[in-house]
Image (spheres, rainbow, N blue to C red):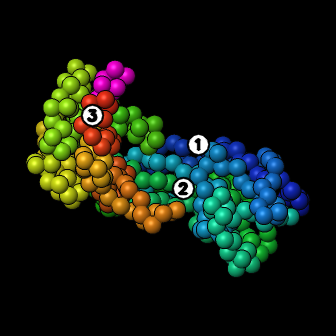
Amino acid sequence: MKIIFALVILFVLTFYFLQGIELSLENNILTISGSFELEKFPAQKINGIEYLKFDTSDFGKTGNNGEAELPVFSKLVNLPNTGNYVLKDLEYDFEELDLDKKIIPFGWEDNTPINSEFYYKDEWFPKEIIKISKPSIMRGVRFSQISLAAAQYNPALNKIRILKNIKVDLELDPSKNENSVANDRNSNIKPFSNILIEKSGRTETPSYYNGNYLLIAPDNCVSYLQPLLRHKEKLGYKTRLATLTETGSSNTSIKNFIQNAYDNWDYPPENVILIGDVDGTIVLPSYFVEGYWTPWDVTDHPYTLLEGDDYFPDIMLGRIPVRSLTQLATVVNKIIKYE
């Protein structure tokens, strides 16, 4: 590995990274190549102290709370039903620069306390230049995230290394079977396929279908939802209405009903709409997660996690949080008129 030694440059401005990174795939070898460049932008001031900040509008961020916020280039890459990429070869140069101020801590927007001990460490962060995530599954399509550090930072020396002339070769290893796909019948649905073609590089073009709408509602809502079901059918969708008598009234039983539909129905639901609020006169349960600003927050996201052990949704899910039948009739009319 070569080192490009630069003249000492004292930055009183933040850094804006320009990415010149290319990806290519040949014979199951994924190659990432290119260099990262810098431009200067105004510094960020926190509590009267100026910090250097990477503008990561085209990047992700990496770092632990209270430690230096560093830029990372990330890309989702499509995978077959089994296997994952492993590092075959890594080459890069770097340009080393001296700084006159510390790099801003991760989480500064939320007033996260600074980890003072970190800024005395004589180490280069992040320690790993490239990371390959465990595979994830989204609607029967499998992918992993490749993350490449754009720079490394030594807090004790207050220096950064900007990566140049990068060449990373990743090889597909078929023995990596975490989160394998046993049945990809759910992958050929237009909205999900469009997302994955754009984000993960999926290129195959199977025959797509519009998918199925599944509405789950308390029993007294059935007649009020008939106009919405007929409307969706006219748009080319298959529809199915399930009442809480059929699904059960707990979040666990509703999730199990959706899971069975996803796994076994001839036309597994793409869109699931929950009717009702978490309290009131029309009730349909949700989940609760620990909140950031409050002790607990309401979420429906667990209903969407139907394949793999990742956090990517496998269905499109929404809720019409009406609290009375009058509100439901009004909302149904608005949806039909809007569409």
Q: Of callouts 2 and 1, which one flags the residue occurring earlier in the amino acid sequence?
A: 1
Query: What span is in magenta?
Result: 332-339
> Secondary structure beneath disc 2?
strand
Q: CA distance from mark 3 to mark 1?
A: 55 Å
**Image height of 164 relative to 120, above or below:** above
Is residue 103 a member of the stretch shown in magenta?
A: no
Provide residue 164's location: percent of width, then percent of height.
70, 53
> At x 34% / y 20%, what residue is drawn?
337
Q: Nearer the viewer, residue 68 or 208?
A: 68
Q: Residues within 10 Å of mark 1 (few under 14, many from 20)?
A: few
Q: Is residue 85 visible?
A: yes
Q: Is residue 59 left or right of residue 256?
A: right
> Secondary structure beneath disc 3?
helix
Q: Is residue 183 visible?
A: no
What residue type is disc 2 on? Ser
Which mark is drawn over residue 258? Answer: none
> Secondary structure beneath disc 1?
strand
Pointer 1 residue: 22
Q: Of callouts 2 and 3, which one flags the residue occurring earlier in the amino acid sequence?
A: 2
Q: CA distance from mark 2 to mark 1?
A: 13 Å
Marks 3 and 1: CB-CB under 8 Å?
no
Pointer 2 residue: 147
Q: Of callouts 3 and 1, which one flags the residue occurring earlier in the amino acid sequence?
A: 1
Pointer 3 residue: 326
What residue type is disc 1 on? Glu
